Image: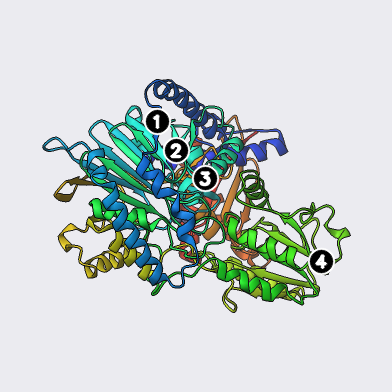
């Protein structure tokens, strides 16, 4: 629902929305009628605008629910070969000495499995009718980090992989969430057979509550991912209408012409999967975020054998994660971080406060393990951290030794050097628990020299400043802060170059479409594929909204569908249009001037001298002269209107506005937002 006003209505809306607010304030104070009132009612004021929009959405969702409820229940099948393949995963994990050995073992297993599987892969896909095409349309995650969403389309059937949100940049004042434009999916809602989710990170599931207000297809996800979605939908009161199906790695879901196989891979959250998506055109591998961890903290190593088997059977296209393509080597194992915790917990006589990404269940598990090892009690603080603890322990992804957890209310009764607090705020997010601790706003925790604060995360690009601010504040309070830049306290969840090469080597794709990355990363990844022998003509570096058409022996971009960013405000309901955003930026950059003119309702003459209020523009005490000049400009504008017998208030207001803005720009080179308000007496 992108704003589609022309510039004229934009201007009107902008003005009247703010005027309305000001008038209200002024009106309340003085009990007077304002000139702005008449237009304000139909104007797009922020709170007024949201409600009808939300109602509209609700209505739509209901309609679509009815539609999909009949047609598209997914079938889960697990072929004997898959069952066979799945079992040895635990065994295979064993104790592989090196990555290389592991890969060799995996490749060997893949070869054997391929022999065993025989023609299984080919029998699954009926051969495509002549001219049939697989259309792949990324609606997010290309040329950007975040809001991952990819559409797969074969004839009348559509499936969606991932449904993520992005994060606002500094220019988006007051915007909390960025989601992909899904108008293409709304238009084709009846054709969508399912949303398939690779893992539970926000950039892959975060847009679901917003998307489900518009379309409501069945959702397929592994257990932990499903658990995290349920919390999210509960918060948005959408859980009842959602159709969530839990799927295990190794299983295959039939969705229209597609069959989607869930393949276990490693990442910085448990229960992540890649998909092998088979349509009559062939099998496409969509990795989602992945890494290869040969010594994972929980669960098995990525199912490289299955990927290799698919490679031997013939993979039409690979759509891999490009996030870490700029990083050489292999990504490190999650277990490595544990050893660092051991060192930092051992012989420490302070209270320990650790922050990490709430979704990194394995990391949290390791913190708890070392806390238990050194006889410490653990308190959990921060909403997302509490949520993940609840879901992951309920579902068995986390094992907490008995009597280790204490509630934050009771934590003060435990000696400080026997305490570990696990908290949110690894990105320095305002309002997060760590932020509140640093700025003395946390109810249960006061930071002082008796604290060792461990920040077990790297800054997501764009967050460096906020996190350093928190680190500085913690140091200033006397705490010892150990952070990733000076100590190895974090490993990435994304495959580095050598792992990415391995993925290409195993799957041997004919076509290559890099996903998940900013433009330069996608090009780097394309380059890497070329090095690995993929025909350059078979590689497409695409963009959001582009339609990529695949047949069994061709690939090309053909046309575009609407794509972009939808900005969502804090309430989680209202979408913020470019007008509101522009206002916020304007206010932040230049400040605001309100001109209050009291006019006679009878003859339209000025009753008293104009009043000027500024916010965020100049420091008043030092600019009395400027204020005086502004009052003069306003006064002259009104007098000139009177002389010209102009009595229409909106004309008077626009004269005042343009004269004042011209004066200010000439004398101060600034253009604050100017809001003329006429009070009728
Ligand atoms: Zn992820
Ligand atoms: Zn991601």
Q: Which mark is residue 418?
A: 4
Residue sitting nearer the eye, 595 or 248: 248
Secondary element type, mark 3: helix
| Observer able to see residue 606 | no
Q: Quadrant of residue 498?
A: bottom left
Q: Is residue 417 above or below residue 163?
A: below
Q: Which residue is mark 2?
A: 220
- Give neighbour class at mark 2: few <14, some 14-19, many 20+ (Cα, 10 Å): many
- Give neighbour class at mark 3: few <14, some 14-19, many 20+ (Cα, 10 Å): many
Q: Kindly report the distance in space between the C-alpha atoms of the residues bearing marks 1 and 3.
A: 18 Å
2 and 3 marks in contact (CB < 8 Å) = no
The tag earlier along the polypeptide, 2 or 4, is 2
2 and 1 marks in contact (CB < 8 Å) = yes
Ligand 1 within 8 angstroms of badge 1 C-beta:
no
Residue at point 26%, 64% (across, down): 526
Q: Kindly report the distance in space between the C-alpha atoms of the residues bearing marks 3 and 4.
A: 33 Å
Q: Which residue is mark 3?
A: 225
Q: Which residue is mark 1?
A: 74
1 and 3 marks in contact (CB < 8 Å) = no
Residue sitting nearer the eye, 349 or 665: 349
Residue 654 horizontal/vertical position (percent): 47, 44
Residue extending farthest to the left is 130
In this image, 9 relative to 401: left or right?
left
The tag earlier along the polypeptide, 2 or 3, is 2
Q: Which mark is residue 221?
A: none
The tag earlier along the polypeptide, 1 or 4, is 1
Q: Is residue 489 above or below residue 16?
A: below
- Give neighbour class at mark 1: few <14, some 14-19, many 20+ (Cα, 10 Å): some
Residue at point 76%, 68% (across, down): 374
């Amino acid at each position: 629902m992108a704003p589609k006003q022309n510039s004229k209505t934009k201007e009107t809306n902008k003005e009247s929305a703010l005027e309305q607010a000001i008038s209200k304030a002024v009106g309340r104070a003085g009990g007077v009628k304002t000139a702005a009132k008449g237009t304000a009612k139909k104007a797009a004021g922020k709170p007024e605008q949201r409600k009808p929009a939300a109602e509209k959405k609700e209505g739509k969702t209901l309609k679509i629910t009815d539609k999909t409820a009949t047609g598209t229940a997914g079938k889960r099948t697990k072929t004997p070969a898959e069952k066979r393949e799945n079992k040895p995963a635990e065994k295979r994990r064993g104790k592989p000495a090196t990555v290389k050995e592991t890969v060799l073992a995996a490749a060997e297993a893949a070869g054997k499995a391929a022999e065993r599987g025989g023609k299984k892969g080919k029998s699954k896909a009926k051969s495509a009718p002549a001219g049939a095409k697989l259309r792949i349309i990324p609606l997010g995650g290309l040329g950007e980090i975040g809001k991952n969403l990819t559409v797969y389309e074969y004839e009348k059937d559509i499936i969606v992989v991932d449904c993520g949100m992005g994060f606002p940049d500094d220019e988006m004042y007051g915007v909390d969430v960025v989601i992909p434009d899904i108008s293409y999916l709304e238009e084709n809602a009846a054709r969508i057979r399912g949303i398939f989710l690779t893992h539970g990170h926000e950039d892959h599931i975060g847009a679901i509550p917003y998307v489900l207000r518009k379309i409501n297809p069945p959702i397929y996800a592994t257990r932990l991912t499903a658990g995290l979605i349920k919390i999210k939908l509960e918060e948005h009161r959408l859980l009842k209408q959602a159709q969530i199906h839990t799927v295990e790695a190794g299983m295959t879901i039939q969705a229209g012409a597609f069959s989607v196989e869930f393949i276990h891979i490693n990442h910085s959250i448990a229960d992540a999967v890649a998909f092998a998506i088979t349509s009559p055109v062939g099998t496409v591998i969509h990795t989602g975020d992945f890494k290869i961890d040969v010594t994972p903290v929980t669960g098995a190593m990525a199912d490289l054998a299955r990927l290799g088997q698919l490679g031997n059977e013939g993979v039409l296209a690979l759509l891999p994660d490009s996030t870490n393509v700029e990083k050489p080597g292999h990504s490190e194992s999650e277990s490595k971080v544990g050893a660092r915790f051991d060192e930092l917990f051992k012989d420490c006589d302070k209270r320990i406060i650790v922050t990490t990404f709430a979704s990194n269940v394995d990391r949290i598990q390791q913190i708890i393990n070392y806390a238990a090892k050194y006889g410490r009690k653990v308190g959990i603080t921060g909403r997302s951290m509490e949520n993940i603890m609840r879901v992951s322990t309920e579902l068995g992804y986390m094992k907490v030794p008995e009597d280790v957890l204490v509630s934050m209310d009771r934590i003060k009764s435990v000696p400080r050097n026997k305490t570990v607090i696990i908290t949110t705020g690894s990105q320095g997010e305002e309002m997060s628990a760590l932020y509140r601790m640093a700025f003395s706003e946390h109810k249960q925790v006061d930071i002082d020299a008796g604290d060792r604060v461990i920040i077990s995360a790297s800054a997501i690009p764009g967050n460096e400043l906020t996190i350093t601010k928190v680190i500085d504040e913690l140091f200033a309070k006397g705490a010892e802060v150990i952070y990733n830049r000076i100590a190895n306290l974090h490993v990435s969840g994304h495959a580095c170059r050598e792992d990415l090469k391995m993925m290409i080597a195993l799957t041997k794709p004919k076509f290559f479409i890099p996903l998940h990355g900013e433009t330069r990363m996608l090009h780097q990844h394309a380059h890497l594929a070329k090095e690995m022998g993929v025909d350059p003509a078979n590689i497409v570096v695409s963009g959001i909204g582009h339609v990529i058409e695949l047949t069994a022996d061709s690939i090309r971009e053909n046309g575009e569908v609407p794509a972009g960013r939808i900005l969502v405000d804090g309430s989680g309901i209202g979408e913020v249009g470019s007008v509101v955003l522009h206002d916020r930026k304007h206010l932040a950059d230049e400040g605001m001037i309100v001109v209050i003119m009291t006019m006679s309702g009878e003859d339209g003459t000025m009753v008293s001298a104009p009043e000027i209020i500024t916010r965020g523009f100049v420091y008043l005490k030092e600019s009395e002269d400027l204020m005086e000049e502004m009052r003069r400009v306003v006064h002259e504008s009104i007098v000139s209107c009177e002389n010209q017998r102009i009595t229409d208030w909106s004309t008077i207001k626009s004269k005042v506005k343009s004269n004042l803005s011209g004066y200010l720009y000439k004398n101060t080179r600034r253009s604050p937002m100017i809001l003329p308000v006429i009070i009728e007496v």
